[in-house]
Image (cartoon, rainbow, N blue to C red):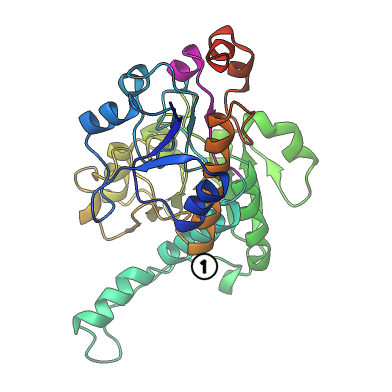
Amino acid sequence: MTRKILVPWAMPERGREVFKKSKVEVRYFHGPKGEPPTFEELIEAVRQADVLLPRGTQPVPKEVIESNPNLLGIANFGVGYNNIDVATATQLGIPVTNTPGVLTETTADLGWALLMATARKVPQAHHYTLSGEWKETGGKSFMGQDIGPGGSNRPKILGIIGFGRIGQAVMRRSRGFKMKVIAYDPLMKKEIEKKRGVEYRELHDLLKESDFVTLHCPLTKETHHLIGERELALMKPTAILINTSRGPVVDEKALVSILKEGRIAGAGLDVYEHEPELTPGLSELENVVLLPHIGSATQDTREQMAVVAAKNAVAMLKGKRPYTIVNPEVLESTVYLQKLEF
C-alpha cells in the first residue's frame, strides 16, 4: 500500500509543490474555506495516514497520536510545537519536526510593530479618527510612551525574556532607537554575558528595570505562567508588556487585573492563553493592542515554512532523517527502527 501524508488544513502552494516534485501521495483534508476538521474527523483521518502535517495552532494531543501509533512522523508547520504531545509521540517512536529560523525576522518585525503600536496607541488613534469624533484640533489626546530617548534624552530600557533567534532579532532592531537592552534566559546566560549590546539580568531585576518587556520564550512547564501577578507587580507603572511567544507564558487573568487597575501602562498581545478565546475583560480595556496570532503572517514566510514542513514530511515518509527534528532521540529507539523494517 502507498504511504500517505495527511495535511488537515489549507497548505500554501509552495509546500504542495514539494510534494508534487517528490511524487508522494498527499491527502488535503479541510473545509471549502480552509476550516480544519473536527477532533473526531482528525482522529479518523490520522488512522489512514503515515505522516501528519498539522498547522502550528492545530492541537495534536495524546488521543490523536495514539489513534495511529504506526505514524512515521509529525511535521509541524510552525517553530513552536506545544500544540503536539511530543512526549507521547516520542514514546511511540514518532519523530516530530518544526520550522525554525524561517520565521525569525518576520516575527521580530511583528513584535516590534506591536511594541510601537502599543506605546504610541496607534490603533486607538486610528479608530478615533475613523469614528468621526475628531471634529477639531484639541480633541481627544493619545499620550503614549517614547521608544527612543525622546525629550528626556534618557535611553529607554528594553527587557527581552527568551534570547533565542527571535529575541536576538528584536535586540538588533532596538539599536536604531538607542535603547539599553537587558535579557533573561537561563539557558543562554553565558552567551548573553559575552555578547555586546546586551546585559544579563535575573527575571525580577529585568521586570523592575524595563520600560518595555517583550516575551520570546517557548512554552514549557517552566515557562507556563512565567509572568503572573507577582511578576507583573514588579513592573513600572509606565511599562509595557509585549507577547509574541505563546499565550500561556502569561497569566492572562492577572494581566487583565493589572491593566484594569493601571498598574502598568499597557500590553500588546499576538498570542493568548486560551486562543482564540480571550480572557474576560481583556477586549474591554483601552490600554491594549490585540492581534490574532499573526507573528509569521507574511506571504514569503508562510510559503517558506510550508516548504520546510513539506520537506520534513517527505523525509519521514521515506524513512530518512528529517531536517529539523525536535526529539532526535526517537530515531535511535527500537520502536521507530522496527517501523522502518516494514
Q: Is residue 233 visible?
A: no
The answer to whether residue 154 is left or right of residue 212 is right
Element on which disc 1 rests: loop
- Residue 139 in percent (x, y) is at 26, 84
Picture quadrant of residue 229: top left
As drawn, which residue projects farthest toward the front? Answer: 1
Q: Which one is in front, 14 or 126?
A: 14
Region rendered in magenta: 87-100
**Above or below, comparing residue 235 to residue 105 in the picture:** above
As drawn, which residue projects farthest toward the bottom? Answer: 136
**What residue is pinned by disc 1?**
146
- Residue 10 in percent (x, y) is at 35, 51
Q: Is residue 136 visible?
A: yes
Q: Which one is in front, 287 or 53?
A: 53
| Rendered residue at 34%/46% (across/down) | 9
Of the residues shown, which amino acid type is indicated by label 1? Asp
Quarter of the rendering occupied by the N terminus: top left
Does the stretch in magenta take in 35?
no
